[in-house]
Amino acid sequence: MDAIKTLLVDDEKSFIETIEKRLKKRGFAPYLAESGKKCLEILKDSTIHIVVSDVKMPGIGGIDLLKKIKQDYPAIEVILLTGHANPNDGVEGIKQGAFDYLTKPIELEHLIGKINQAWDKIQRIKEKKEEEAFRERMKKQLIANERLASLGTLSAGVAHEINNPLAIIKESAGWMNTIISGMNLSTVPRLNDLKTAIDKIEKSVERARRITHQLLSSVKKQDTALSEIRLNEFLQETIHLVKRSLPEKNIKMSLDTRHTDGILWTDPYQLRQILINLFTNSARAISNEGWIDLTVADTGDLVSISLKDNGEGIAYENLEKIFEPFFTTRAPGEGTGLGLFITRGIVEKLGGKIEVESQVGEGALFTLVLPKFNKNCDTQKGRN
Amino acid sequence: MGKIRIPTRVLVVDDEKDFVEILSNRLEEAGETVSSANSGQECLKVLDEKTIDVVILDIKMPGMDGMDVLKEIKKRHPLVEVIMLTGHGSTETAVDGMKAGAFDYLLKPADFSELTKKLVGARKRKDDQEERIRQAEVKLLLRKGGNI
């Protein structure tokens, strides 16, 4: 538990020093301030949870100090100490947002009691805030999931429908090519232009076909074939594979498997597909020279595989979009924007999760969390 | 070389009329004898009327589904070979189809050279099968003759 950080404010030095001494005996370590001004200075530099302040002070008075604190540090709770003759100060203080007030001369037990109550309130607010943030995060994630699922279904449907006209275009262009091949330049004056145009049609059909096939593969139910993977060997192999396909770049790749027993039950082909996609993305984000670190760690029933690079990073506003289909920052024809969409699809099929952290210029960290023993293991075996 | 090739009798089945038309043109240009059909029913009708070596069959058609057509073809004309055209999303369908007796499958839009290769393969399988049947018949006849 966090220690309660309190700050005592009173212009009567001997008074706060006495209270400090007695509070210390009870395990508190209060900060001291002899004026409202000093108090605000301390708040600027240190984290304080509870301020205990006298009301009657020269300079900034207790009530003004309270207003200032509530305005600038709304999380801090303030307990006011009022003079015996001025109970109205306390009421005014509570109106202005003080936690409570105590009348001087104060009893230490009372003060400690109030401090603890204020601390409880702070904890409750904090918990509530955390819960709200958590709920908000879950809600966002749920919306994102639903959105991706419907986008996936939609785009697969579109892809399927487009395949038929694509097939017609492809056959037509092919047939024209066959016919033209039998002719010669003297009978058809612009034969070469025609050939170039047909060639362009065929190449574009090929490009569109790659997109439709990728989209369809992202939603198709692949049979998962689960087996025991020896991670060290498997990942070394994958790194080797990736390195071979990126000869033009100087990328240092490292593997850390110190925090795993090295075993994972999942579909090796699909896991490899995921890793190759992530590696390729990282490599693209690295201009010429850089590093990619692969770290594997066991946590209970889960295995996390994280891939960290020092590439160009991902802009904050893009972080939520990178898993959507067709989102790409690359030039048309260079990237379909389907890589991470498909990757995420595979990860979910394997019962896992994928997350990203990144800042522009700071590289990116992709964390893949998979169940160590895929739940489908037994049913799959039973079925086959 | 000037070697005369016996044309393969191909039946193209797809509900996309334009696709059937163009593919037929290309296959004819390549020297095959081509018939066409735009539905499963029409396909079966053509098979009853003409001798066909290989059917190129779209798996996704309205009305009679390509898979049902395939099973019906194999039931009525077991020697006719079938090459399936499927969408990429349905590899399982392709596998099921091959279990049901299809020769092979191609993803749409298919590559013409690949289609031609599969066509040659299908034709060869059919020829080989027919040859085995002929030889078996000959053996049977000879044995019968020996018994007399």
Image (tube, coloured by chain):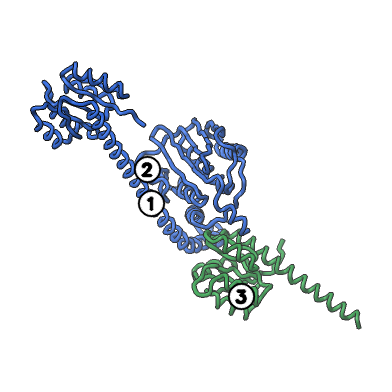
The quarter of the picture where residue A184 lies is: bottom right
Q: Colour of chain B?
A: green
Gap in angstroms between the C-alphas marked 2 and 3: 52 Å
Quadrant that contains the C terminus of chain A: bottom right
Q: Residues within 10 Å of mark 2 (few under 14, many from 20)?
A: few
- Specify whether A142 is left or right of B95: left
Camera-nearest residue between B7 and A101: A101
Give amino acid for label 3.
Glu
- Labels in figure, total: 3
Residue at numbered disc 1? A142
Q: In this view, does A158 lie above or below A70?
A: below
The answer to whether residue A268 of the structure is visible from this angle is: yes
Give amino acid for label 2.
Asn
Residue at numbered disc 3? B72
Quadrant that contains the N terminus of chain A: top left
Residue plotted at (67% across, 63% down): B120
The answer as to whether the residues below labels 1 and 2 share one chain is: yes
User: In the image, residue B135 lies at what x, y percent?
Assistant: 81, 72
Q: Colour of chain A?
A: blue
User: In the image, residue B137 lies at what x, y percent?
Assistant: 80, 76
- Specify whether A8 is left or right of B71: left
User: In the image, residue A121 lies at what x, y percent?
Assistant: 26, 37
**Kind of element beneath mark 2:** helix
Residue plotted at (83% across, 76% down): B138
> Which numbered disc flags the more N-terminal residue, 1 or 2?
1
The answer to whether residue A176 of the structure is visible from this angle is: no
Residue at numbered disc 2? A318
Gap in angstroms between the C-alphas marked 3 and 1: 46 Å
Camera-nearest residue between B35 and B3: B35
Camera-nearest residue between A227 and A324: A227
